[in-house]
Amino acid sequence: MLIGFAVGMIASNAAEWVMHKHVLHERGRKKQSFWSFHWHEHHREARRNGGRDPHYERSIFAWNSQSKELIALVGATALVTPLLPIVPGFVLASWFSAWRYYRLHKRAHLDPKWAREHLPWHYDHHMGPEQDANWCVTHPFWDHVMGTRVPYLGTERERVDLARASARAS
């Protein structure tokens, strides 16, 4: 069961990478797509508010980017649930990963200062100039493997961007 759990954690992080890159960004850029909430609501709000997305303050029962994200996570875990009698560790890791993803992603967008410290790769995804990189939320493992980890936090580019934003706000 322990090996299945480890494989499930690695597979869940890979699924996070694939889903974010190919579904939420590639399909999500098309306004008519169900997945458009990610690009046209979530990214817009995070960029506009320094990483904060006010949709996470709303009810999960309202039709917004938060509830759509939850539906996708529940759907993904439902797909692997029939495998529970065969590979219980894998399925438990999938459930845990979905729960952890939602918890970390929500906290990151309610507390951007916390995200800068604890999920810098996700901060880089939203606040950096290259939003088509840094696909992982919970851990950047597959970003490193796939060569899509692009640091922004603490770089000269971030310092220039923050100074420019501060000057505009003055």
Image: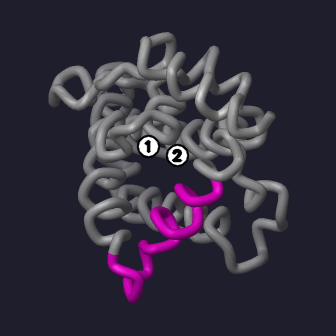
Give the percent coordinates (x, y) of residue 162: 60, 25
Q: Quadrant of residue 14?
A: top left
Q: Quadrant of residue 62?
A: bottom right
Residue for point 42% across, 21% down: 157
Numbered label attached to residue 94: 1
Question: For the residues carrying marks 1 and 2, which lies nearer the camera in this image?
Answer: 2
Residue for point 37% across, 61% down: 24
Mainly helix, strand or loop, the magenta region?
helix
Asked if the residue at tag 2 contacts the one at tag 1, i.e. Cβ–Cβ closer than 8 Å, the answer is yes
**Label 1 packing within 10 angstroms: few (<14), some (14-19), many (20+):** many
Residue for point 33% across, 78% down: 30
Q: Quadrant of residue 150?
A: top left
What's the CA distance linking mark 1 and mark 2? 6 Å
* Above/below status of 144 relative to 108: above
Tell me the magenta residue range: 30-45
* Above/below status of 167 relative to 71: above
* Above/below status of 18 relative to 62: above
